[in-house]
Image (cartoon, helix red, strand yellow):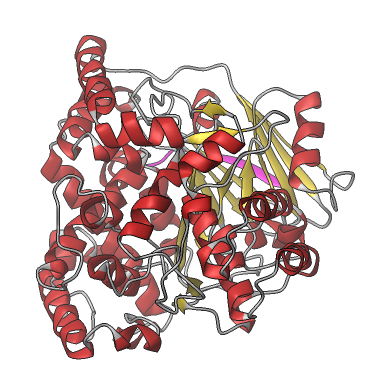
Amino acid sequence: MNPEDRYGWCGRILEINLSAGSITTITPQSNLLHEYLGGRGLGARFVYDNGVVDALSEDNILVFAAGPLTGTPTPASGRASVTTKSPATGTIFDANAGGKFGYVLKKAGFDAIVVRGIAEMPVIIEVEDDEVDIKDGRNLWGINVKEATNILKKRKKGSFAVIGKAGERRSNIASIAVDGSHYFARGGVGAVMGSKNLKAIVISGSGKVQIFDKDQFEKTRRTIHRMLVASPTIDKGLKVFGTPVLVKIAEWMQILPVGNFSGEAFDASSLYGSKLKSAHPSKRRACPACPIGCKREENGGYELPEYETIAMFGPNLLNRDLETIIEANRICNDYGIDTISAGGIIADLGVTGSDEILGLVKDLGESGINSKHSSSISVKGLELPGYDPRRVMGLGFSYATSNRGGCHTRAYMVAPEILKKPKAINPLTLGGKAGYVKVFQDRFAAVDSLVVCKFAFFGVSEEEYANILTAVTGLEFTSEDLMCVGERIWNLERLYNLREGFTRADDTLPEQFFDGLSRDAFEDTLDEYYAIRGWDDGGVPKKDKLRRLGLLKKE
């Protein structure tokens, strides 16, 4: 990497092979960082190049990555990404989390950590600037997230990525906790970490991310901050209630996942964000450089449930008891379990009573029950989140075409169809959705690679983030450049899944949703989507598309 490129990026990637006990620092080529940015994009490139592997074998890798804006005061840039092959879906998979991990990773002087192999016994990776060690972690094995994180915090300062018992037991709904309160939550990324006998990564650093044009950076930073503060969705919604503000909106739109997505009506008034706020006074928690602060934490350090958890443990289980949801959230987070998938599995089992719900949540953590052994409502093996696709059809179409399975964040059609940001789109039709979904998928592939919080885009566009990326790196980025990066990443992920045997037949929804959604209209929209993407009728990218994105040479 050229010295002039060391703005924004650190120009160093840490590679640790737990089988060999080796620690190596890699200097990436400049074009790798320019073309994939960091975060999700950088992880996708490493995981794709790693070839065909079994998700829980020593050949699979975990890539923890920050972005070029991480570690700077760029608003909403305090997140990180982990990418791997998912044991739950068999797809390429990235998970995104807040907390200090990405911020501290950059302060330590690294853009990413690539973990390979399997340790002979439970271990902890400790990184403190250039000092990297693989240490005995047996004393923490068998201890859940909160206690393990607190033990580590007494030993060292920094940021902590930790698995609980679910990850140790290789449950494919296992998450990775960051600093005990944020989560790389979906797809069983915690199971991959557990399969490597890796209990935790502890990281600290004393460095500083270099900014190319500090004056222009500060000017653009202030602009973004003002736009975020001026957004009613952020200032009057997320800052006041956190993501539970969505409960009332989703009920009004009749899109709550009631009774395992039965499509019935449900009175969710006892679960509104306002009820949670009044019943459980809490403090607002923000990631580094974030003016939003959507997390809510009670005294004692226990985070309150977010919208997805409320939806999946509330209406999804025909449960109106807020205290049950709060306790289920605590148990999931401590064991390191994805609350969306856990709620989906429990609904599939027909459990609705409070005691039964909480008992089964503990069983999921203790036994490592895997979602692939259930018939839960899912796409590509990933349980659907808390929005019924019958009445938000673009979001439903984005579930079907998601590269990682049933996920609302790939295109984040929640923004235009539910919150009407950046513009209102009719949620009750598939008309025009092929183009919208493609654009939003590309946009958020780039956003996940910067790595920036999606909530920022309720008030800011990619143009402002392209401008601040230019100020940070000294390289000229436009909004069109960011969209091209996102499209490159999306197509690379598609190539990975095709190599794994996924086909057009996997780009669909569970059968029950076609009782309120025309299958013919869905298939026509899928044809249109493939055509817009430059793919053939089977969903395979054409050579012209790959050549334009610089991917053909990699094949």
- Answer with the quarter of the image where residue 214 lies: top left
The range drawn in magenta is 21-29
The N terminus - image quarter: top left
Residue 148 inside the magenta-drawn segment: no
| Residue 133 shown left or right of residue 216 in the figure | right
- Examine the rendering and report whether any part of residue 104 can be seen: yes
Q: Nearer the viewer, residue 177 or 550?
A: 177
Q: Position of residue 16 (x, y in %)?
A: 63, 46
Residue at the right extreme, as displayed: 139
Say which residue appears at 35% left-offset and 78% top-offset.
498
* Figure label count: 0
Say which residue appears at 44% left-offset and 52% top-offset.
43
Q: Nearer the viewer, residue 333 or 281?
A: 281
- Answer with the quarter of the image where residue 401 lies: bottom left
Q: Position of residue 339 (x, y in %)?
A: 59, 58
Name above or below for residue 64 compared with residue 233: below
Residue at the top extreme, as displayed: 215
- Answer with the quarter of the image where residue 19 lies: bottom right
Residue 27 inside the magenta-drawn segment: yes
Say which residue appears at 11% left-offset and 76% top-offset.
531
Q: Position of residue 176 (x, y in %)?
A: 63, 50
